[in-house]
Image (spheres, rainbow, N blue to C red):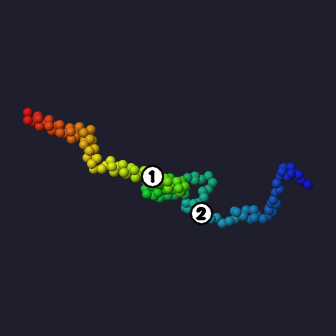
């Protein structure tokens, strides 16, 4: 009876080799008819011969250009939808909605017509030196000069 040590170190048993007289069984993969892509040299999927420059073949086709909306959809899906859990995505969308609502309210209060009229006089005074007060002084000075 063989011990475990001799079983571990003994070489593996070999399978019996086929008889040499039957060559078709030895080279059965060579006797298969070639596929059409192997035969047609004009096919872009033809396997190049060994040693050929592979990059000279035009096998790769570039995908068609994506439009801006398709690119933005892919970006949005990859950034938010596919990387977050469902509850995380809902929380993030709620926070973004609240942030945009605050920005909209702030801009609507800042750009109200009454505020814009007051800002216009300040901007005119700071940029051009002309405003309601400066304009009134310049007109009064011009009237005094014309009367003198």
Identify the residue shown where x is 55% and y is 52%.
55
Q: Check if mark 1's residue and mark 2's residue have beta carbons within 8 Å.
A: no
Q: Residues within 10 Å of mark 1 (few under 14, many from 20)?
A: few
Answer left or right for 61 relative to 97.
right
In this rendering, the answer to whether 143 lies above or below 20 is above
Q: Residues within 10 Å of mark 2 (few under 14, many from 20)?
A: few
Give the quarter of the figure containing the C terminus: top left
Label annotation for residue 131? none
Q: Position of residue 43 (x, y in %)?
A: 56, 62
- Between circles 1 and 2, the one closer to the viewer is 1
| Residue in the foreground of this view, choosing between 97 and 10 | 97
Check disc 2 and report the residue beneath it. 37
Identify the residue shown where x is 24% and y is 43%.
121
Give the quarter of the figure containing the N terminus: bottom right
Answer left or right for 2 relative to 94.
right
Q: Earlier in the sequence, mark 1 or mark 2?
A: 2
The kind of secondary structure element at disc 1 is helix
The kind of secondary structure element at disc 2 is helix
Residue 71 visible (yes or no): no
In this rendering, the answer to whether 7 lies above or below 128 is below
Q: Position of residue 35 (x, y in %)?
A: 62, 65
| Extreme residue toward the top, this view | 148
| Residue in the foreground of this view, choosing between 30 and 126 | 126
Mark 1–mark 2 distance (CA, rounded to whole Å): 55 Å
| Extreme residue toward the right, this view | 1
In this rendering, the answer to whether 14 lies above or below 134 is below
| Residue in the foreground of this view, choosing between 131 and 49 | 131
Residue 46 visible (yes or no): yes
Q: Position of residue 33 (x, y in %)?
A: 66, 66
Identify the residue shown where x is 25% and y is 46%.
117
Check disc 1 and report the residue beneath it. 96
Identify the residue shown where x is 53% and y is 57%.
86
């Amino acid at each position: 009876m063989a011990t475990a040590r001799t079983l571990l170190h003994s070489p593996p048993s070999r399978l019996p080799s086929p008889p040499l007289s039957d060559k078709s069984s030895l080279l059965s993969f060579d006797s298969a008819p070639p596929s059409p892509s192997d035969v047609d040299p004009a096919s872009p999927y033809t396997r190049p011969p060994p040693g050929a420059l592979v990059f000279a073949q035009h096998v790769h086709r570039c995908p068609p250009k994506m439009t801006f909306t398709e690119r933005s959809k892919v970006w949005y899906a990859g950034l938010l939808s596919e990387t977050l859990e469902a509850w995380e995505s809902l929380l993030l969308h709620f926070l973004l909605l609240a942030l945009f609502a605050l920005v909209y309210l702030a801009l609507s209060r800042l750009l109200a017509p009454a505020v814009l009229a007051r800002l216009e006089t300040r901007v005119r005074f700071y940029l051009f030196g002309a405003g309601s007060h400066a304009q009134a002084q310049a007109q009064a000075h011009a009237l005094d000069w014309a009367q003198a």
